[in-house]
Amino acid sequence: MRLVVYAFFAFALGLLLVGLRELLFGFEENRCSMTYMFEYPEFRRVQLPRRVARQYPSYGLYLYGEGAYAQETRGLKLTGAPVLFLPGNAGSYKQARSLGSVALRKAENLDRQIHLNVFTIDFNEELVALYGGSLRRQTQFLHESIKAILRLYKDRPDPPTSVVLVGHSMGGVVARALFTLARFNPRLVSLIITQASPHQAPVLSLDPYILEFYSTVRQGWNKRAEDLQNVTVLSVGGGNLDFQVRSGLTVLSCPIDDLNKISVVATAVPRTWLSTDHISIVWCKELVLATVRAFFDLIEPETGQFTESPEERLSVLNYHFFRHPVLPPGEVQDATVTFSAPPEAWKEVNTLRLFYSAPKEAEVKYFLFALSSRRKAYSHFYCRSNNMEMTSWLYGCTQMSGSVCVQAVDLSSDTELLPAYKTVAVKISELLSVSHLIIDASNPSGAQFVVECELQREESLTVSVQVPHLLSFGLTVSEVSINSSGLLHTLQLQDFHQVYQAFRITIMSHCKTTKDRLPSVYRVRVPWFREDSFAMSSTPSVSEIYSMLHSSRPDNTSSALLQLHTAPNCQYKVSIRTSFPKVLGQILRFCGPLLPVYSALALLLMIRVQLSSVRRSGHPAEMQEAMSKSLAIHKLELPVLLLILLLRQSWFQDVWTSLGLPGVDALPLNTVEDLSHEKASVQEWPRLVSPLLCVFGAAIAFWGSAVLRMSVCFLSFIVAPLHRPSVSRDCGTFGLHTQIVLMVCLGVLGSVTCGALALMLCCLLHLYRVLRLQMTERSLSHVLNLAPQKVSHNTENGFNGNDHHSNGKECNGSALLSESVLQDVRDDLQLHLSLSTVLTLTMMLCAPSLIHWKHNLRYWLHLDPDPCWPHTVPLLISSVLLINCNTNSLLRSKLMLNLTLRLLLPLCVGLLVFCPLHIYRVTHFLSAALSLFVCSCYF
């Protein structure tokens, strides 16, 4: 039986490791180019008012500079446009050097006619993603920093009136929180660019302050939606490589009609087209270049400052981050275009397709496609060229003179830049006034390039394919063969619209003739979010694409698309399989932060099984055996499902609200539309994912407790020489007066310094009790093995009575040795190992506030606010009292033990209902469970 248990949890751990591997290492290596400094970077501290410096002693404001520019700005006499970089969780202010260095090189290329002044804030590398108590303080310091920056320009003839903010990770959330401050003037910030910032919800809700902060930001922006429509916010997600902040969390929640709030994933940004991890998104050269180019295009040459026009800001961001059309921002497309080329430069194409390779010699060349006889037969005209110069190249002729077009309209505005070439597609039905389509294939500079164009029927080039079921485990394959000679094909991936889906798409190309062709570009297009991904392949070849979504389609009305920009006269075969390892990776990407909740759930169920075993047989079950028996998932899922179904009834919702109960936490697998809302949701897959998470949580608890057991054994050998051999189960206990003193001292320590520090000391005290029991168990085993004695079972009188009144005296082996004594010690050891595992989990959940307190100890002694105080006072008291508990004291409390057993299961259900999106509540539930345990020992 034990072998089966170990095999089951080994299999569960294996699945978990497979998912972790896919999440952490299952994608291509980071292909970002590094940004380098060409001169030594300097960070010059900006002096703040004394009031601000005293109020925020751990923060600072700096100006970035290099070489001669750093010397010029030594006196802080600035003439550029101000940009302020905000680091994120544990981020350094020196991360601004990538943005600052690239901006400086760009300004030097322009002879410093316009340039940026890049500032950065030192937030003392605080763990604000794990401890939310500093977020409000950071926001207030940001406000003071913006006012200090603008004061530096007060002597300028055209001083800036606003500062552009670039926020990484939580820095982007802090930037948006500015607008919730009562005294903040919204005109001080008109543009915010955030990089991998979790706007939807925190990644880990380890304290209530971070959720309150998010709620304040969300409500503030909702209430002032009309007033903030002129504030442009661009959110950039990192893509699959960023496993710390998944890109679904970077979506901005805003009204549909607010066009100034836009979100995109780095894989869809033109000239970037790659995924970044959470840190490299700051220094990724491709993305930094796009940001800096946008900044310089936003600067007005007359004033040298950023434009105040929201329309111009939106146009520039659209150009650099979305489509990259042919017309640069600010340029107006001519209404009509006239041509003066000689007749020999014009050539009419009588076939459906054009393939033209420009020669090395400079020449003027125009190709004409007549539309009069083709309007009814064809719906679209598609053209592509690897000439990456974004200039006008497609026109619609409105006036012909013989075989020459005299006047035309420019149709190049819809040109889109892809990794290998630029493409444009126009609807023929919309060109009623156009008689011919004109392709400008001129190469005045003698550059070689290729142009391919064709007339298309949309219905013949669009194919629907049903993706395999999620539970096919890769055994079922959906195949599509494309024999058409078209240049563009679209596959509608039916029912591919959920984040827990993952597919391995294999594209095999085969051509009859071997000749140079433009590479094929494969694009997974997501209609409801800008998270498109691209892959490029030569022809013929076999390519594999792993496709997952960052956001689900809320209404399931559309699915993802696979666009194939193919080579002509080639055959393509597309095979789609479910990738089960990637599915596990997606589940961990979205639900991985919930594993502490399910681990706590497994530990409580394990303790329940142990207490049940004590009541039934007088001995607790071993931890591994108890863990295997506790996996009764139906006892948890059925009440949760029933509660969710009841909450769909209005009368039950009214009763629930009148009782003041919090909302039910749903798994974050549905949509990206505000995950922090507390709404009940009944969907098929989240309810199937929850049992899997239960198994994962049990596996973590199972092997975590095994590691703890081995660590205790190892530590007991180290500390054994410091203690005399013991043969009593009372080793490591404390007397009543000592317990009272300990509780008072720990309470004072927690109130004066940090509640997590007092909790850590409690865990160490309990660990000492476990170590003493381990040493006693080993001593008794050795003695009994060397000199076995037959002793009657009633020799344990000295161990049953006043067990917890030993006043901490040395355990000196005065009791008679017997098998029953050894069994008692082993029982207590099993019990306290389980309790120590629970206390270790609570300490780990409270560790971020302890780390933050230690990090800022030189500035203040008391942590304010403290998420662990005073909520952990019952936990501190229970931890001290549990040290003296043993199986005999549990057996004496039949009534309370039965009550505890009955209440533990509802506690577990409550843990599953209220904690997935509020992880800090896990500590409260564990505290309640340990309090019940204490009552069972003492009453």
Image: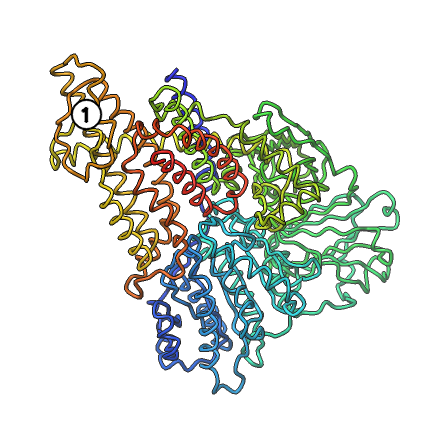
In the visual, does 791 lie left or right of 202? left
Q: Nearer the viewer, residue 337 or 259?
A: 259
Q: Position of residue 55 (x, y in %)?
A: 38, 73
Q: Could you tell me which residue is drawn at 49 percent across and 60 percent down?
A: 288
Q: Quadrant of residue 730?
A: top left
Q: Is residue 286 above or below residue 717?
A: below
Q: Nearer the viewer, residue 864 or 517?
A: 864
Query: If the image is split into quadrants, where does the N terminus sit?
Result: top left
Task: Tally the numbered discs.
Answer: 1
Q: Could you tell me which residue is drawn at 19 percent across and 28 percent down?
A: 728
Kindly tell me whether residue 312 is visible in this rendering: no
Q: Position of residue 513 (x, y in %)?
A: 64, 33
Amino acid type, mark 1: Arg
Q: Secondary structure at mark 1?
A: helix
Q: Quadrant of residue 391?
A: bottom right
Q: Is residue 88 above or below residue 799?
A: below
Query: If the image is split into quadrants, where does the C terminus sit?
Result: top left
Q: Quadrant of residue 884?
A: top left
Q: Could you tell me which residue is drawn at 87 percent across and 45 percent down?
A: 376
Q: Position of residue 931 (x, y in %)?
A: 39, 40
Q: Position of residue 133 (x, y in %)?
A: 43, 59
Residue under pointer 1: 778
Q: Nearer the viewer, residue 535 or 406?
A: 535
The residue sitting at the top extreme is 790
In the visual, does 168 lie left or right of 126? right
Kindly tell me whether residue 682 is visible in this rendering: yes
Badge 1 density bin: few <14, some 14–19, many ≥20, Cα 10 Å:
many
- Model colouring: rainbow
Q: Is residue 820 above or below residue 380?
A: above
